[in-house]
Amino acid sequence: MSMPNDSQVVSDPNDGKSSTSSCRLRRFTKVIIVASLRLVSVLIGLAYVKYYTNALSIEQVGAFFYLGTLSYLLNALVFVPVDSYMQSRLSDFDEIPWRVLRRLVCVTLVIGLGACIVLSTPFLLMGKLSVLDIPLLYGLAALLYLCSSLRNLLNIRGHATFSAVMVLLESLARLLVFISIAAILGASAQTLLFSSIVAFFAEYLVLLWQARRSLHLSSSNEELDPSAKIVRTVAVLSGGAVANTVQLQSYRIFFSAFGYTGTVAALGVTANIGAVAMSSCSQVFSQLFLPRLYQSRGKSIGQYASWGAALGTALLVVGLPVSEFLVRKLSHAEYAPYAMAVGFGIAIEGCNMLIGAYGVYLTLHGRLGVLFRFQLAGAVLSVLGCAAMLIKAPGDPIGLGTVVAASQLLVTSALAYYVHVFLRQND
């Protein structure tokens, strides 16, 4: 009897089942590892909040949120848009053109420095900032950009576990560095910002090392896009990012400028507990599902949004009943009356996760103008609401949080409806 040749051999159907089971097991293991790492980073992050809210006076906590908001505004104005463009554009490349990216990053950092000076000048003239605050604002924004950009790039390219490890180490570094610096220089809003800069710098060095050894790099000098197109794209993204930051953070500047730092601190500290928890969950979720969104050119947006909304709702259901306990344990007893603001933090951060996904989808499909218009409308609603609260009830953190959270929910709902209609029209 002759032996069958390769074309005559019948494959075992169990081989396919075994391969599928193995793939599912690897995916499940990855989910468990990433989720466990993020859980630890959440606990460290909450310990960080507990430490600095006890180490700083309520006025210094308000000052920290004020300075941090200015830095994040700079980040939203320049750095976030460039990173969003870069991640979207690189999804078309098998290899990373590192020379091109280096030029783009260097130009972005220079533009960011100029923007920082322009942004800071009015506050300097009004006596709301000191000259020594400016390097802190720029350093925090620039290093946050460099770290988050490299983490995103590594995550999208299949290094989700490493990215999760770096988030954990970042949380630990921020806590330990602040404890060390506070022991030497004293605890203040400025030393808290400086400790974050030191931690981000250490993280950046590790991320850069990992990127050079694990990513497929190309020495090609071919530009990603013509300069005019990059500027137009980034300008629209910048407008949307600034609008989103104004929508969610402007109350910290307005209320602090008029002397209501206690209101800022009460809402900021309590909402931040919920935001830290939601941010940690959303980072696990994004690490696992955002690469698929890029790879599918946005086709998986419905699944992403459904599961993301379910995640946020579940965290609200679990978090709200224990919010007062969390606030007492993780901050200071004086913040306990405002514990329900933990829910605002969860809702706002959960919506941010969904808005980010809708932003990726609209970027991939050339609909950035739509994203900007929705975010601008949200900023207008939020600023008008905050102005009304400043006039009517400047000492009501819960009312202020309700205004900000409601504007965020409206923007997210409007974007969800638009993307749903767009998907149906293009099926």
Image (cartoon, rainbow, N blue to C red):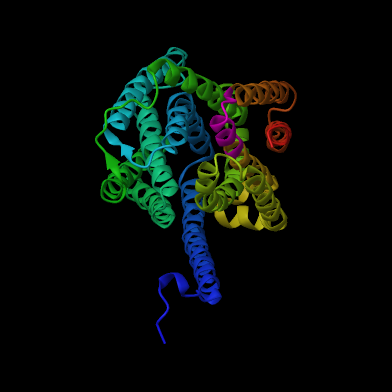
Q: Residue at x 46, y 60 (%)?
A: 37
Q: Is residue 33 above or below residue 17?
A: above
The answer to whether residue 161 is left or right of residue 292 is left
Could you tell me residue 301's position as x and y percent? 63, 43
In the rendered image, is residue 403 in sight? no
Q: Quadrant of residue 112?
A: top left
Could you tell me residue 85's position as x and y percent? 46, 30
Front-lying residue, 385 or 426: 426
Instruction: Judge whether residue 286 is colored magenta.
Output: no
Front-lying residue, 20 or 198: 20
Q: Is residue 311 above or below residue 100?
A: below
Q: Residue at x 56, y 28 (%)?
A: 245
Principal secondary structure, stretch drawn in magenta: helix
Pick out the residue farthest to the front: 1
Could you tell me residue 12's position as x and y percent? 52, 76
In the rendered image, is residue 300 in sight? yes
The answer to whether residue 86 is left or right of residue 221 is right
Q: Residue at x 50, y 47 (%)?
A: 291
Pick out the residue farthest to the left: 219
- Which residues, given as a range, are shown in magenta? 357-368
Q: Quadrant of residue 144?
A: top left
Front-lying residue, 193 or 359: 359
Instruction: Judge whether residue 360 is colored magenta.
Output: yes
